[in-house]
Amino acid sequence: MSIVKNKVDAVIVGMGWTGAIMAKELTDAGLSVVCLERGPDRDTQPDFAYPRVVDELEGSVHRKYLQSLSKETVTIRHNMNDTAVPYRQMGSFKPGTGVGGAGSHWSGCHFRALPEDFKVRSNVEQRYGKKFIPAGMTIQDFPVTYDDLEPHFDHFEYVCGTSGKAGVLNGQKVEGGNPFEGSRSREFALPPNPNYLGAELFYKAAREMGYHPYPIPASNASGPYVNPYGCQMGSCNFCGFCSDYGCLNYSKASPNACIMPVLRGRKGFELRTLAQVLKVNLTADKKKATGVTYLDAQGRETEQPADLVVLCAFSLFNVHLMLLSGIGVPYDPVSNTGTIGRNYSYQNLNRVSLFFDETVHANQFMGIGGGGTTIDDLNGNQNDSTKSGFIGGGLVWARQPGGGPVRGIATAPGVPNWGSGWKKGVKEAFRHSFYYEVQGSCMSYQDAYLSLDPTYKDAFGRPLLRMTFDWHDNEVKASQYLVEKASDMCKVLGPKAIKGDAKKDGDHYNVTQYQSTHTCGGAIMGSDPKTSALNRYLQSWDVSNVFAPGANAFPQNNGYNPTGMVGALTYWCAKAVREQYLKNPGPLVQA
């Protein structure tokens, strides 16, 4: 028999960025809130304290801060005719676990979407005609605009202490920033971080190519900072341990450092860790959620009744919970009907490595997760799809998040993979090379989706989430085009060797190789309940007291990292709950 807890106003599943934001906003409104986090509690002290946190073996091999794939994972296949197999070793993407979630181990790149990213389908149709969109590509417009989210982009950047330089401020272009961005209401919270050598050379090469380089917006503090919640941050010391690690110095924005200090002592907020949520409980007609069922730290089945259920797990597992709980209609790719699992997308990522002689000292062991330089000249409306051959856009950037022997050292073309030749190549490359990355958008397709696996189950007896995904011609062309442009830019710098890894025609999605943790879609927001799981306020069309903020809401992915957009959408969702839903519980948009 389940343990039944006292009813609360709201239960939140997951304590990453979205969970922390929603908990702060809902307790601000006076609600009693319980947050259920499947992993352990984490904080800068003791979990991210020096020297333990900079142990490469623990962080990058044993994956201390990532979820246990032995308990809960996904199965993956390329198409509907394949049999999916479990994702057993961290490779392509890295879901976090514990308080902070992926917001603890992220790098810190903190972009806003471009205004045109919100109207992808209508933008393409207006520029090139409806027939330009390939058959089977299911891209959709967001049901919100850049102007809707601008105040929330701004607030999230100030919560994170984001370092950067405005390019368009109150409608006026500003020298040194991104001239193609949407207009900002004020400058960044902090000025840009210092550049490493590769970023300085990127500026030189980009300008010679006629591009417009600007500092990557980075939630790695360039100076001492106190955010709007009174949380203190310290200057980044370029230790090179951002990606895969928590920050030892209170310098990288995270839920742990930027929101949790306020929540931990707040009346009306309760955090329960090692609490594995199994399902959302629904009424018999499946029109209303009554709470959630979870396993507590002692493995006891427990029910938490609540008036409001907010799904704030990693994007894939928000979709998983909706499918397991019977919220909405599962997507059917054959008939192109149903909404839960629809429009899964990812991120297109490649690398161009530059190798120099001993006169160029790159010092790869130093790094800032989000610091560096980038261009938007190939992104958004700057990409002429009739010339490039693909829909979407992307970035080329110079970013040095830090390197080390355990994480791997790139070597020049022709260097063997072992032996004395490899040792010589490593010695020559480590201090005299750096890389530029190419990150592109990923469109959504009728045959890319999430569903429940018919064969494999997790440690709790539930069907695993099944991912059906492969690269399409559009994303392969994008990879080739952007890597070619990046390589042309690199030649300006005169390296002794260049090595790029553009996708080849016919390449399949490789789940063993890390590409990004930017999994998107599956429970998307939209204006039509027939083609979206959530309305414009991230509220379930089917169960009105369930909200699901996160990258799962993206109808497709743009060229940027999703965190800035995820944060803005979550504040947008919280505002709607506080100002509309609580006054009149029910659907905020009529179907």
Image (tube, rainbow, N blue to C red):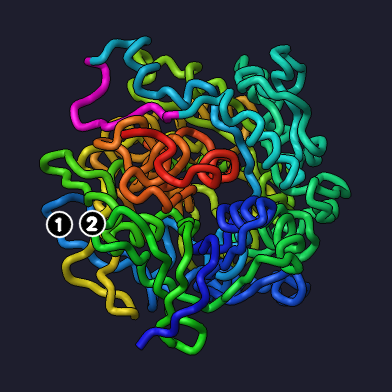
> Which secondary structure, mark 1?
loop
> Quadrant of the image for the N terminus?
bottom left
In-image side of 94 versus 402 (left or right)? left
Q: Are marks 1 and 2 in contact (CB under 8 Å)?
A: yes
The correct choice, above or below, for 107 with respect to 371 in the image is below
Q: Is residue 550 above or below residue 131?
A: below
Among numbered discs 1 and 2, the one appearing first in the sequence? 2
Whether residue 424 is visible: no
Q: Circle 1: is it few (<14), some (14-19), or many (20+) Cα within 10 Å?
A: few
Indicate the amino acid at tag 2.
Arg
The residue wearing badge 2 is 77
Task: Report how far apart the C-alphas of labels 1 and 2 lie in the structure.
Answer: 6 Å
Q: Locate residue 81 relative to residue 20 in the image: left or right.
A: left
Q: Quadrant of residue 342?
A: top left
The residue at 73%/65% (across/down) is 266
Q: Position of residue 226 (x, y in %)?
A: 85, 49
The residue indicated by pointer 1 is: 82
Q: Residue at x 48, y 57 (%)?
A: 308
> Magenta residues?
131-143
Query: Was residue 370 drawn as part of the magenta stretch in this picture?
Result: no
